[in-house]
Image: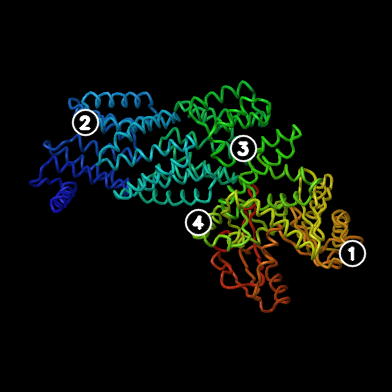
Amino acid sequence: MVEKSDRMVRAAKVFIRTGKTGRNDLQLLAEQCDRLVRAETQKSFPNALDMAKKIVVQVRRQPEMPLQLALRSLGWAAHVSGKYSQAEKAYLEARELVIRIPAIRARIDRILIDTYMYKGDLDEAKRRAQSSISTFRRIKMNDEVAKTRINYGNLFHRQDRHKDAKKQYNLARRQLERKSGHDLVLGLNYYNLANTLVQLLDFPKASQYYCMAKELFGKLGFKLYVTECEYGLAWLSMLEGDYHLALRGLDQCEKNYYKAGHKKGVMLCRLDRAEAYLGLNLFSDAYSTACDAERHAKRLKLGYEMSKAAFFRAKAAHACGHNRDVKKALLRARLGFAGERNSGFEAAVRLFETQIQNGRKIDQRVFKSVRRLFSRAQLPLWEAICDLHYIVDRPADMNVHKRLAANKAVQSVPHLLARWQTILGDGEYLKGEVEKAVEHWTHAANVLDIARAKLPPVEMRAAFMRGKSDPYERMISHDTESNPQRAAIWADRFKTAGVWAASADSFSGMSERGRVEKSLAELSRQVSALSGQLGPITGTRSGVALGSHPALQKLHKQVRDNLLTLEYEKTGTGQRNEQLITDIRTYSSKMPIVQFHFEQNDLIAFIHSAGETRAHRYREGRRKIRQMIGLWQILLSRTLIDANLRSNNDQQDENRLFGELGDYLWAPLEIGKRSKRVLIVPDGALANLPWPALSHDGESLIAKHSIWLSPTLQHFGHATRLKCQGDRFGLFVGETSDLGHTRDEIKSILKLNPNAHIIENCKRSDGPDDGEWFAWHYIGHARHRSDNPSYSSLSLNDGPL
């Protein structure tokens, strides 16, 4: 039997190449040719389409062979290649040939459902679905009815009628699971059902069905269908806030699609990547990726995907300040969704238009009409988003509160749950129920921490700071006067944003850690490539550079290696607070700790000393600090531009500024001269100040104290528990082609440490991974990401780090 099958495969290949049929059964030969085309679509769409065209040419020369089967092969290859007009033409010609054979005619109608759906002709797609089901029922082919229901479900899913789609998929599933021999179709049903369950917020079942489909496709050897399931799982990860896995999954899926010539798959990966970047607040990357996805969707004539890309483009353009593009992109999105009859996304566009026009407030009439569209479109996620926007301005509307409490999306999607809990806390606080408010805010912060724990470690605190779901600031504000130590802890957690792990040993028994660690190197390469897409190179200390966090940039590698957490809310967050209290008491018994935090326009200093904590508020401190750093920037710029004209006046001006800064910041701290060491935990622009050079009462701080700096208390705590055995000093020279004083800087450092290990033309692979080092020093350019400073990078000779 196997020998006969192999012989038929060889005969089919000869026929495709030469047109010779030999003594083979022509029907069996045509069926084998069809199988070869379908198998080739799992490897390469272009090759499959080319093969199908050759088969049609050869069959037209053989009147005895079934032309309708060859045309169906061509229609299938054209359909999966995204050439829907070509597919329609082939299918309709095949249909005319079998017009008097109901079963085959209905099968062609079934595949035409998807073809017309992707062409945007939804009425014709619906007509074909109903015709196919009616025919199969009449001739009592129940299995074929079930298969058609899958295509009908796809049509409902395309229109965001997910409950209707789920009903069709489940009817098909029950029929197909009764008999064996339907593995491929059953796998497709599981996959499509999972897509719909994601939209209906049933994430556990969606994941289960994706995995069941993936297993079936794997057994059958359908690699591209396996990729489809992996794509679905990446999409699910993104909705759950696990952008780490989502970005990695999309990257691998795009490679698989590209290799197979699946242009639509490549475009979909880019479209979802744009959505992921929006979720990470990487607006520049979201904008460029959405533009790219829209171009590809237009080329493929995919109206729905083109509209979705335009919508993402508009949201990113608004965040980036590309105001002229916002209106044009929104218009394309709205018209596109209207043409596709997708009321859900049409409502999403209207909601966003209202937000940017009215400063986030929603007019009551607009709210009701938009929400009605979301409800009709069966999109609980968007219903929740709409209600959460509305409740901020109308907190007394109990009907909205009840809907939110019953909405699955609020419990399933982390940033929605955090926002909901924050809003509930705000309501309790206004009623005077302070402890209940703190409970809600704490819950929200814990949810955000857990979600952020899954993010790329270099992301730090920018992601998931959505809208008004920022419980940290509320608790800091509430506790600063009454419980400054607890306020200081929340300020530190706010900075680390849930991606801190105090010790690698904490996770030694967790299998997840091994998997995540393997992905970190790959992820860091993605982030490095990402960070170099936009942003000017500058050799001067501009205002933009002064607004970044060089302390965090220096710790980029430690962040990648050490700031990984997989904690769960029930065990992680409370222990972290207790550990921080213990650490503060221990460290402050040895030296004073000054922990700064910007709260709106004010600057707060938490002074930890001898186990106790007090707070000092600098009213309008943000404005004052910004003004002084602006003056320092002018002095630096003047020095860089007029280096040959530098005079004592420049030095005096800088010293005078440092004295003013020192008196302003240091005097209220009341730190005595006996304190030999002082730990400073700066915030924002304060991280860029030359603290030892500041002076107080006419004397520089370095003359009185040894100044230690740390980005957070948790960084310091982790660092003190590490014992560095190495004494090597690394000097890394990156991209310095237009920097004039590189050699002078190297000479100065060598005077301090003649044994410094110098790496010229440093590449990313030259990172100090071998053994322990005492210190590293970097010379070269840096790229600042204004849309997300935590993705700023150092410019090495083979790309950004």
Let me know if residue 532 appears in the view. no
CA–CA distance in space, label 4 to label 3? 37 Å
| Mark 4 neighbour density, 10 Å: few (under 14) some (14–19) many (20 or more) | few
Against 765, residue 34 (above or below) is: above
- Please state the horizontal and vertical placement of residue 197, each as a whole percent of the image: 44, 36
Nearer the N terminus, badge 4 or badge 1?
4
Circle 4 or circle 2, nearest the eye = 4
**Which residue, given by chain and number where applicable, does mark 4 sit on?**
512
CA–CA distance in space, label 4 to label 1? 53 Å
Circle 4 or circle 3, nearest the eye = 4
Q: The disc labelled 4 sits on which kind of residue?
A: Glu
| Numbered mark located on residue 699 in the image | 1
CA–CA distance in space, label 4 to label 2? 50 Å
Tally of numbered tags:
4
What secondary structure is found at the residue carrying circle 3? helix
What secondary structure is found at the residue carrying circle 1? strand
| Contact, mark 3 vs mark 1 (Cβ under 8 Å) | no
**Which residue, given by chain and number where applicable, does mark 3 sit on?**
318
Q: The disc labelled 3 sits on which kind of residue?
A: His
CA–CA distance in space, label 2 to label 3? 51 Å
Circle 2 or circle 3, nearest the eye = 2
| Mark 2 neighbour density, 10 Å: few (under 14) some (14–19) many (20 or more) | some
Q: Where the C terminus falls, by quadrant?
A: bottom right
Depth check: 234 or 8 in front? Answer: 234
**Which residue, given by chain and number where applicable, does mark 2 sit on?**
104
Q: The disc labelled 1 sits on which kind of residue?
A: Glu
